[in-house]
Amino acid sequence: MTARILDGKVLSAQIKDEVTARVEALKAKGVIPGLAVILVGNNPASEIYVRNKGKGCEETGMLSRTVRLDEATTQEELEGQIEALNRDPEIHGILVQLPLPRHLDENAALAKILPEKDVDGFHLINAGHLMTGTEGVVPCTPKGALYMLRSTGEDLSGKEAVVIGRSNIVGKPMAMLLLQQNCTVTVCHSRTKDLAEHTRRADILVSAVGKAGFVTKDMVKPGAIVIDVGINRVDGKVCGDVDFESVSETAGWITPVPGGVGKMTIAMLLSNTVDAAERTLGK
Ligand code: NDP
């Protein structure tokens, strides 16, 4: 079997088209959706992500603002910037680019963002909404991965889903979303015994580990939908967690890296920002 490709470029373009139309509609009502990204220090990977987010805003007609803070910024200064953006009516979405320098408290900073402006969906209030299945902001990467899963047209209900990774930003919210789709969900992590025994049962396999070549053909059930969230660099080249060449011989569907989930993450960030701007109209 040769897997069909879940193309992040095509799927994210669909979302961006929808976002562009919604931005136009908001502008007609006098609202320009605005996204602010706070970047502390000069981590080269973060610089790229922030640039791509700005580009996405530009493409869809949104206002984009980058707040650059020095590597030595204090917690107080960082939180002061967040509070200023919370009060700023031009800004509907606030994102603190992670990771922060070690001396800063990530959780404390995220907790300062107004939940309705928390377009990354990392605030405890939004995590609680996801946990309880009530309306809140859903983290962009798992939301994008779910969009890809849905685009297969397969009925997700009742499927065995295995998520490798249990981070707060990918693994756990992904598991919650799959549970909402009525999948039977297993979450694996570094202490899981006999990982392959779990993954081989998976109709849906999501890998969010951060290790190149981690998921191999023998770990994948024939016909499975394989979503590769990992972003790794090997000899300067970007690749995922999944050994694409061999796994695409057995999977039914597979996401490439690059050109997969990463593209969806940015599209969902834009979508979450428009959601936030639309909510202000209702007030
Ligand atoms: P974390 O490092 O926070 O989490 C990695 C997870 O993998 C942990 O839960 C860890 O287990 C688990 N793990 C590590 N080694 C093993 C192992 N040998 N067997 C099973 N599980 C293991 O990473 P993130 O969740 O933040 O990100 C994961 C990957 O996704 C990274 O490559 C990151 O760059 C990428 N990413 C991609 C995005 C995109 O837009 N495409 C967005 C965000 C992240 P334990 O908890 O026990 O330590």
Image (cartoon, grey):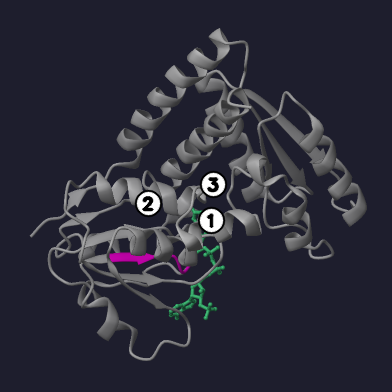
Give how far apart the Cα atoms at labels 2 and 3 are.
15 Å
Callout 1–callout 3 Cβ contact below 8 Å: yes
Q: Is residue 235 visible?
A: no
> Which of the numbered marks, if any, corresponds to residue 233?
none
Q: Which residues are magenta?
A: 205-210
Q: Of tags 2 and 1, which is closer to the observer?
A: 1
Q: Which residue occupies the foreground of this view, 105 or 194?
A: 105
In the image, is 17 to the left or to the right of 33?
left
For mark 1, give the secondary structure.
Answer: helix
> Which of the numbered marks, if any, corresponds to residue 129?
1
Instruction: Please tell me how many numbered marks the rendered image carries.
Output: 3
In the image, is 137 to the left or to the right of 4?
right
Residue 110 x/y as whole percent:
72, 54
Disc nearer the start of the sequence (2/1): 1
Give me the residue at 67% from left, 54% from top. 98
Give how far apart the Cα atoms at labels 2 and 1 are.
19 Å
For mark 2, give the secondary structure.
Answer: helix
Q: What amino acid is labelled 1 in the image?
A: His
Q: What amino acid is labelled 3 in the image?
A: Val
Q: Of tags 1 and 3, which is closer to the observer?
A: 1
Give me the residue at 22% from left, 57% from top. 156
Q: Of tags 2 and 3, which is closer to the observer?
A: 3
Return the residue at label 3: 137
Q: Is residue 264 visible?
A: yes
